[in-house]
Amino acid sequence: MLVVAGLALGACGGAGPTDVLVVGSGISGLSVALEAARGGATVRVVEMSSVFGGHAVMAHGGLCIVDTPIQAAAGIEDSAALAERDFLDWGEDATEGWVSFYVRESNEMILDWTGELGVSFSDSVLQLPGNSVPRFHSPHGRGLGLVSPIYREAVLHPNVTFVWNLRVDRLLIEDGRVVGVEGEELRSGGRREFRADHVVLATGGFQSNLDMVREFWPEAYDFPERLLVGSGHNSVGLGHRVAAAAGAELLNMDRQWNYATGLPDPRYPGSNRGLNAHNATSIWVNRTGERFVNETGSTKERLRALLRQDGARYWAIFDERGKRRLFVSGSHWADFETVERVILGDPEITARAGTLADLGAAIGLPDGRLERTVERYNAMLAAGRDDDFERFGAGGVPYDLAPGWQEGPIPLEEPPYYALSFFPLARKSMGGVAIDLEARALDREGEPIPGLYAVGELAGFGGINGWAGLEGTFLGPSIVTGRVAGRTILASLGSAAAPVPSVGPSPQRSAGEEFDNGACLGCHALPTLIEQSRPGYDHFERAHRVVLEREHSCGTCHGEMYPYRGGQHRKDPLAQIETCARCHLAREH
């Protein structure tokens, strides 16, 4: 616990009433908390996990932002009117009110705001499918570099407290108004309730709950034989069920944004966990060894083509020259050495061979088919025209999520050759709790539920995507809907709230060479603890497995806790922000 000027920052706090109770500490929940706290509201954030950030910490972090100074510096001419047309055309039935608000306010509400908090962005802005001009802004440090500054500022606000490891499963309602929440303490199994004048649900989506994904699967497509889970571990629809039980309307639940780029996550063998991965130099071949889509086309184009393939499975084929172009979304994968060691070095994930014939045999393709497919592809590339899928030439537009990696396709001719097996990946839910333009949750009659708000993915991002996202339109709307909810609450509080500044952090202590692992391990037997799988300790176990594998000193992450002082032996939340990067590597390629 960090003590500054007599204030305990980041503590759990008591169970007394507050102005605002936020359920979820992902990017939308943190945006609510900070907006409300800065305006003078007392805020309590309750979180199911033991760490902040939700799925945003694990994401690429890219944001679709309109008419920014970064665009202008790069000679890109953009406007709210142009962006609004793109959103509505590409999204197919997007919510016009939220679209109009977003395209006009995203520069101030996202770029200016995060920049003030310390987020920095690449000078390179990408143009992704559906956008008339480049709008995809990439923060340095990926998702971790985007979320950490928001959390840091929230921790430094004396009127914000955090409660960890509490799974909310019920809203408290009195006289038709939501007045709090009740939930289970995951580590103890006990029950606890918290009350507030305003309750904001920021619990994320449901794409890690395959039963819900199947229940709301779009009717236009058969459910695939294998669907990987690529959303946050806690994106299981808890907020949807809690809100619905309180009378909230759930809208457009079949508007799911799933990817064709699902790679089995080697860190979870035998599971359905997946990574969003793509190699811009690769060609995709189906079970017959044939290409079936423009590999660099739009997300919706590629997914639709994949779902039409036998088994909804394909192999991405690339060579030694192109292997460094393997991009894996998420802060953890920013360092190619990690990608090479954990993915390319795992024979259960990656097939490798000195010839295309041997590679085709290794992955079970028909004899000679892979060689003929690659030969045809290379010949078309030499001629400058993809006659099959217009990936290049004849108006083909390269598309890749990896910043700075749009150099164009290369021939596959330098052994060894690689094959990665891909499946559909459940990623984002673009429907959810119905909200108005003030982020108030609506009931089944379209009326606001007193005291209840919904933001971010739980609210389907306000419906700004319709059926299809422009990319960068998930984290961006999460920030915007969160800040709108905070502003709505502050307006209702009126003169009862007065702006509250953050307080500066206390000097950080560093253990240096004096840190003694024995002093920690005498009480905390890590090898035993991480194998116990205790409820509520999932992140503790995953993180400390990494610690033991890398033989880190305890002082690497917990230098502020040494030497031991009984009454002050607690984690410093600010110091812990810095330790996140030790696992979730935030270096750029």
Image (cartoon, grey):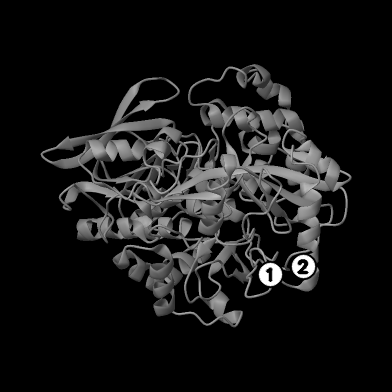
Element under label 2?
helix
Give whichever of 367, 217 is nearer the camera.
367
**Horizontal arrangement in the rendering, residue 281 relative to residue 268 (left or right):** right
Numbered badge on residue 381: 2
**What's the distance in space between the residues labelled 1 and 2, CA to CA?**
8 Å
Q: Which of pointers 1 and 2 lies earlier in the amino acid sequence?
A: 2
**Horizontal arrangement in the rendering, residue 33 relative to residue 268 (left or right):** left
**Horizontal arrangement in the rendering, residue 58 relative to residue 6 (left or right):** right
Estimate the x, y position of residue 415 in percent, counting from the top left. 88, 50
In the rendered image, is residue 322 in sight?
no
The amino acid at mark 2 is Leu
Estimate the x, y position of residue 122 in percent, counting from the top left. 63, 67
Outermost residue toward the left? 175
User: What residue is rendered at 63% in x and 33% in y?
Assistant: 543
Q: Is residue 163 above or below residue 220?
A: above
| Mark 1 touches mark 2? (CB < 8 Å) | yes
Image quarter for residue 72? bottom right
The residue beneath circle 1 is 392
Q: Is residue 32 above or below residue 296?
A: above
